[in-house]
Amino acid sequence: MFSNITDKIRLLFRKDKEPYLCFYKMLGFYPRNIEIYQQALLHKSSSIKAGKGRLLNNERLEFLGDAILDAIVADIVYKKFEGKREGFLTNTRSKIVQRETLNRVAVEIGLDKLIKYTTRQSSHNSYMCGNAFEALIGAIYLDRGYRACKKFMEERIINQSLNLEKISRKEVIFKSKLIEWSQKNKFCVEFNLIEQSLDSDQNPIFETQITVENIPAGTGKGYSKKESQQEAAHATLAKIKGDPQFIDAIFAAKAEREKAAETAESENTTAIHEEAIAVEESISVREEEIPEEHFVDTERIIAEAEEVAFRVRGEKRCVSKFGRSENI
């Protein structure tokens, strides 16, 4: 309270009051270092150059905010649901921090109207608002600390926009969560039905295996394809979270795929460029005018050749008639 009064007094002496007031309405307090909050709203499509040519956007703040948000929500859920098992708490936290929830929350607090991005990116990035919300949490943490982050989440987000009891009862769709993770981090994920059999009661059993960057991940069985995919996605998410060797392997495979794609694109561009040059040179040669002197020389050579041929034919006729050569 006292801190906000002090910040409000300082604001009276500032010329650029509008950004501070805008953030105050959203956060419930005045920013101290407003540049961090402005960076949190800067999508990578609108990156600006900072010192030493470094590009400035909200990706680093998003990384920080993601970790802080997980800790805060875990703290809140732990205290809210006393006596609940670890699995319940983990699932409830996952439902709160999933991209769909964060996107909705970001829109409700008006964050979507403040994000700076290119128009093309907005139509291809459905997680932009959720990512910006995480970056905002990172900015609050750097500017005000953990307590301010937790207070903002409790008073401005959970109490006003989220019903924890309702969220906790909502089923976790692991397949959607895995797809969301893959799209956010640009990984190739495939769901493959590897076996279909019957149990002792002749009920069909499906087994699905998931690959990440063509590396086997989780497998799951169920009495439907959907159920087997759900189980396989659950196992894959657990592997992503708890298997460092698997993480290293998929990141290495992703880097190799991206490098191969860049090489192929570069070669294709070079080939197209070379073909264009060849076509241009061919057209240039065809359009080149033949010098006028060339026609003059050609006509003279033809005339001389005709004259010689005529004389040779005349000499042959003389030899044939008299049996010897005569000069004509």
Image (cartoon, rainbow, N blue to C red):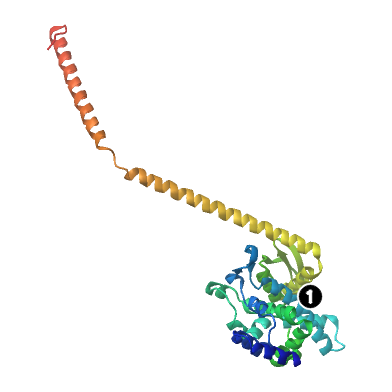
**Which residue lies most toward the front here?**
13
Give the quadrant of residue 149. bottom right
Can residue 169 be seen? no
Quadrant (top left/top right/bottom left/bottom right) for the N terminus: bottom right
Coordinates of residue 165 in the picture (x, y in percent):
76, 91
| Amino acid type assigned to the residue bearing label 1 in the image | Asp
- Quickly name the residue at label 1: 201
Coordinates of residue 302 in the picture (x, y in percent):
22, 28
On the rendered structure, is 308 left or right of 64?
left
Residue drawn where x is 63% and y is 88% of the image: 21
Residue drawn where x is 68% and y is 91% of the image: 9
Coordinates of residue 126 in the picture (x, y in percent):
61, 76
Q: Give the number of callouts.
A: 1
**Which residue lies most toward the right here?**
83
Give the quadrant of residue 191. bottom right
Residue drawn where x is 21% and y is 31% of the image: 299
Task: Label 1, secondary structure: give it.
Answer: loop
Is residue 282 depicted above or below 84 in this figure? above
Coordinates of residue 297 in the picture (x, y in percent):
24, 30
| Residue situated in front as seen by the camera: 272 or 64 | 64
Quadrant (top left/top right/bottom left/bottom right) for the C terminus: top left
On the rendered structure, is 77 left or right of 160?
right
Binning the other alpha carbons within 10 Å of mark 1 as few (below 14), some (14 to 19) or many (20 upward) gives few
On the rendered structure, is 158 left or right of 269?
right
Is residue 162 depicted above or below 191 in this figure? below
Give the quadrant of residue 183. bottom right
Can residue 247 be seen? yes
